[in-house]
Image: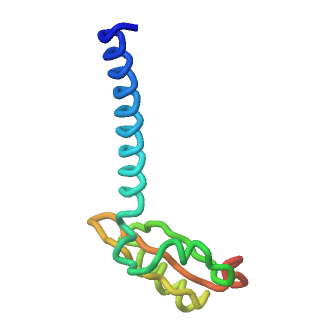
Amino acid sequence: MNLCEMQVQIMKICNRKRKKCKNKIEQLRTKQQIIAPFRPLECDLHQVLSYRFITYRFGRIAVEHYHKMQKYLMDDLGAIFVEGEQDESFVYGAYFVSPGEAKK
């Protein structure tokens, strides 16, 4: 194999690695965008995801239904809702409730 062929092979390998890195970066950015509205929760998400005796749910709710949901969670289920970000249409957050109450 001559020098020119070696350079071509090295360039191919570098291009493959560059493409893999770009794909990985894009995957991580997508994941970051998914969790971005929940950053204000000020909790360790890995720890929350390992809860065994508390049921949790992350999501969003339309602003116009938010207050009704808050009253329902507190009065009927004894649940806690923790707000994340809010935009003009949705409130993002998580609610926590005991497993027995979660079945209601």
Q: Position of residue 50 (x, y in %)?
A: 61, 75
- Name which quarter of the figure residue 56 lies in: bottom right
Q: Quadrant of the N terminus?
A: top left
Taking depth in this image into account, of 27 and 88 the one nearest to the observer is 27
Compare residues 25 and 68 and report the one nearer the observer. Answer: 25
**Residue 5 vs residue 23, the one in the foreground:** 5
Horizontal side of 42 relative to 46 (left or right) equals left
Can you say whether 81 is above or below 59 in the image?
below
Residue displayed at 52% across by 79% down: 95
Image quarter in which the C terminus is found: bottom right
For this orientation, the residue located farthest to the left is 88
- How far across and down, in percent of the image, does residue 31 sit? 42, 54
Instruction: Identify whether 6 is placed above or below 89.
Output: above
Describe residue 60's horizontal placement relative to residue 10 as left or right. Answer: right
Residue at the (42%, 46%) spot, across then down: 27
Residue 53 at x, y percent in the picture: 68, 84
Q: Residue at x 37, y 74 (%)?
A: 84
Q: Is residue 25 above or below residue 75?
A: above
The answer to which quarter of the image holds residue 49 is bottom right
Query: In the drawing, does residue 44 fall left or right of residue 14?
Result: right
Where is residue 78 shown, x and y percent of the image?
A: 59, 91
Tally the marks.
0
Residue located at (56% from left, 86% from top):
79
Q: Nearer the viewer, residue 31 or 4?
A: 4
Left or right of 22? Residue 79 is: right
What colour scheme governs how the chains and residues are painted in the rendered image of this protein? rainbow
